[in-house]
Image: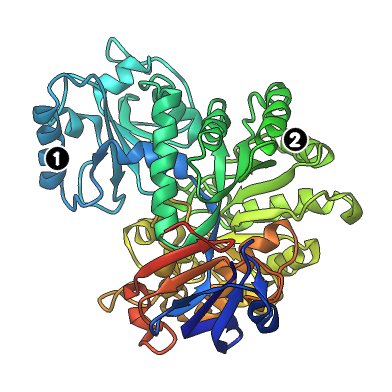
Amino acid sequence: MPTRYHGGKIYLGQGRFVDKVYVSDEGEIIKERTFYNSDQWREVNLNGALVLPAFRDGHAHPLFAGREAKGLDISDCKNQLELLNALKGHLAVNPETTWIDGAVFDRSMKVSFTRQFLDSAVDTVPVVLHGDDHHTLWVNTKALEAAGTLREGLLSVETPGIDVDDQGLPTGMLREWPAMRLVLDIAPEETLESDVGNIAWADEKLAAAGLVECYDAWIDRGMAETYIAAADQHLLKLDYKLCFRADPDTFFVDLDYIQTMRTEVNKRHRLDGNAIKFFVDGVFGSATALVQEPYESTGEHGNPVWNEELLRKAIHTANAESFQVHIHAIGDAGTALAISILEEIPKGSLKYRPVLIHAELTNESLLSRLKDLNAVAAVQPYWAQHNGMLDSCRHHLGEERLSRLYAFKEMLDLGVCMAFSSDWPVSSFEPLKGLSVAVNRRENDSQEVHNPSQAITLDQAISASTTGVQAIRGTASERFFEIGSDFDAVVLDRDIFSLPTMQIAQANVTATYKAGRQIF
């Protein structure tokens, strides 16, 4: 029977509200007349709550987040003593462990980032700690030895991204995927059963935060199979769009597998496998993102992930095979390279809107070209604050470039389609936290405001977290809860429009609806 939701404040977008909405058995918004013409109906009193359109995440890694949640949590370690105690305590509680995996360490922490420091806590088994940017690993000597990078006290593998000391020996810091995979490829493997549990855990977390859709932006072999198994077991509440990762070393070999898995994924309810993700560059914290002006720390311009001609061929091939192209580009030179390659594809030949992920350092010219491409900028609002992750980039970028990052207002002013995302587990999956930082350009009163000229309104932030993500695969109205649309909604315990903006993130999700079905 249809349902009447009333007694609350229901947000229609652009500052408009109503106090009631009618939903069919199928979960669609219907007219009041249709509701009352029904033989039976039911009513839900919202008791003064605020109803927003349900949130969506345009770029995250929920399966990785589920895996990390089972490891050692070092995210609250603020100094070397706390970190040492966490490692020693974990080994004491788990004396039979053969591998310690911890996440995440603050790259701005005042500590000696060396393998010897980790050895002082644990020197009997490999220790692998993930940086808060997830483009950096910090490992002990046992991990380097297990990976074959350190033999008989000598560096034995020449790979970009392995930091070395004055003697040419590995320090224990591994930056970017070619170096990181040396260790991660030998880590204890997850079983399909355990990974299904990991994604089910993540799915519950996302639903409880008010989300109904999420892009998983890193799918390697075995990961799509996890989503398929979870879907077949009816464990998924959200819809997931999977982005297969294009490896520069194996992409053209992997393409047959990706196409086969896309077919299987697309057969499942709640799943979509029509995207491929490319990495153009790295990150600012490791001075590996591609920048037009050299880094102040290294005098270099960053590290390309692909040979340019091979990247061009791979992106054109992905588009020709009817995959949506998602491109990780953080630096201004990385974004310029991605745009240049996309501009070579005739507009009528683009199968889907291209997606530029991150686009942290931009300018008016780059954003105008993005607009002309009809591309989507999938950005991370929670990063636009002076925290450890941002401030650890200062010595690489310098103050002037650091102050220009995350130009959300300029994107919108120039007409760029902007979609919010979390990049979870790099940062919080909770959309309300992202909304708050987008509006305030800080998370709490003790922080300096970052680039305040790029603050946006709450209306704009909600649109980026909802219809902005929907626009990745098409167009979406700026009005919510229209007749005929699905009742995808999140119920909050307080009206964030009437709160001081620094209190936005204090609201709690009390219910999440997907097509009229309550999933939280």
Q: Is residue 45 visible?
A: yes
> Residue 404, position in %: x, y?
51, 71
Instruction: Identify the element where label 2 is drawn.
Output: helix
> Residue 85, position in %: x, y?
10, 40
Q: What residue is shown with label 2?
A: 314
Q: Amino acid at mark 1?
A: Ala
Residue positioned 70% across, 50% down in the render? 337
- For the residue pair 257 and 271, the one nearer the viewer reads as 271
Q: Which mark is residue 326?
A: none
Mark 2 or mark 1, whichever is nearer to me: 1
Q: Amino acid at mark 2?
A: Ala
> Residue 333, position in %: x, y?
64, 54
Give me the C-alpha separation between circle 2 and circle 1: 43 Å
On the image, which quarter does residue 320 sit in? Answer: top right
On the image, which quarter does residue 388 sit in? Answer: bottom left
Residue positioned 28% across, 36% down in the render? 71
Residue positioned 38% across, 82% down in the render? 47
Neighbour tally class for label 1: few under 14, some 14-19, many 20 plus, Cα within 10 Å: some
Q: What residue is shown with label 1?
A: 86
- For the residue pair 360 and 520, the one nearer the viewer reads as 520
Residue 417, relative to residue 424: is it above or below? below
Residue lying at the far front of the rendered structure: 39
Instruction: Identify the element where label 1 is drawn.
Output: helix
Left or right, residue 31 beside residue 163: right
Left or right, residue 451 beside residue 34: left
Q: Are marks 2 and 1 in contact (CB under 8 Å)?
A: no
Image quarter hosting the N terminus = bottom right
